[in-house]
Amino acid sequence: MKKAACLVFLLIFFPVFSGRLKAASLKVSPGSFIIHDVVPGKAYDLYKETGLRLTIHNDNDVSHTYLLSAHRPSGRLVTGYLKIPDAGWCRFEKSEITVEAGGKGYGNLYLQIPDEEKYYNQHWVVNLNVAGKPGPGGIALAVNVRTKIETKSKADVKEKPDGIIAFKPSILRFEDVSSDNAQKGSVTIYNNDNKAHIYKITPFLHSLKEERQSTYLTDSYQVLPDSDWIVLSKDKLKIEPESAGNLSLKLEIPDKPEYQGKKWEELFLVEPEEGLPGFIRVRISDKE
């Protein structure tokens, strides 16, 4: 079980928060994280399977009680991610914990997505909220830990993927790639809106600063050195309402020794003229 879990959960800690979120005297770590390859229908105990849990730091000289909960985010979202359909799919082992003065408390998280085909290929965001329980006449301090969830990529789903924008599969894999041959793949893009959209498709990681790139990358992968190595069949795609369109991609790696034995990623942002964008994750394993 332990070994399999390492393949399911690939975690990234956001350096922008230096490992902690802080609101006055309330500190929580990690500040944010991402979970990959979550299988719908499977129940996960994140601490048991990955060692991940929220740590609440009480730096005050008196004990405090904290309330733990999960919520659908409001306001601006992380680019490429949609709100999780139901925050109740995430729950804490204890919804209330007391932390002694100068001590630490821990929030163990459980996750279970319903066992439905439409929940494969999803990119979601959920807020994990830690709030101080106010005493008489007191005020409550709270922080949100932004959590990104990517469900398992699957090409043969038996129903249309969920979400206003969706993909099948959500990850395109080029494996055992050598620099002396080209490989091709395709992705189906779903417009689940009630009106037509023209989607612009562009490399995403290369548009970000280095510190932000790491917040999207899968563990053990590096950013593809040149996004031009992936050629798209088109950079714009019109899709009618409640319909789908196909995008083809071709990978060509230059024949150079330094490009052998690498693991790379690139994300392609699929952005409508209005509304929320999504992305296609491309993983490349070069032949050694």
Image (cartoon, rainbow, N blue to C red):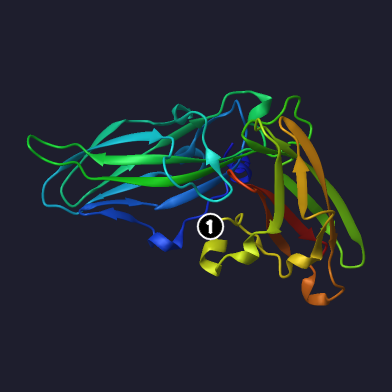
**Three-letter residue code for mark 1:** Thr
Location of residue 261 in the rendering, given as x and y in whole percent from the top left corner: 77, 66
Q: Is residue 175 above or below residue 71?
A: below
Q: Where, by quadrant of the figure, is residue 17 drawn?
A: bottom left
Asked if residue 158 can be seen in this view, the reply is yes
Front residue (pair 163, 20): 163
Residue shown at 66%/27% (left/top)? 118
Asked if residue 258 lies left or right of residue 223, the reply is right
Q: Nearer the viewer, residue 276 or 36?
A: 276
Q: Nearer the viewer, residue 59 or 236?
A: 236
Total marks in image:
1
Residue drawn at x 39%, y 53% is 31
Q: Position of residue 129 (x, y in %)?
A: 34, 40
Q: Which residue is mark 1?
A: 215
Q: Quadrant of the C terminus?
A: bottom right
Within 10 Å of the Cα at label 1, are there few (<14), some (14-19), or many (20+) other Cα atoms?
A: some
* Left or right: 255 in relation to 128: right
Kindly state the secondary structure of the residue where label 1 is placed. Answer: loop
Residue 97 position, x and y percent, is: 25, 35
Question: Residue 6, position in %: x, y?
Answer: 59, 45
Which residue is pictured at 58% across the width and 44% down the height?
Answer: 276
Q: Is residue 238 above or below residue 59?
A: above
Look at the picture and state if 250 lies above or below 244.
Answer: below
| Residue 163 position (above or below residue 64) | above
Q: Quadrant of residue 141?
A: top left
Res 261 visible: no
Quadrant showing the N terminus: top right
Left of 186 or right of it: where is 193? left
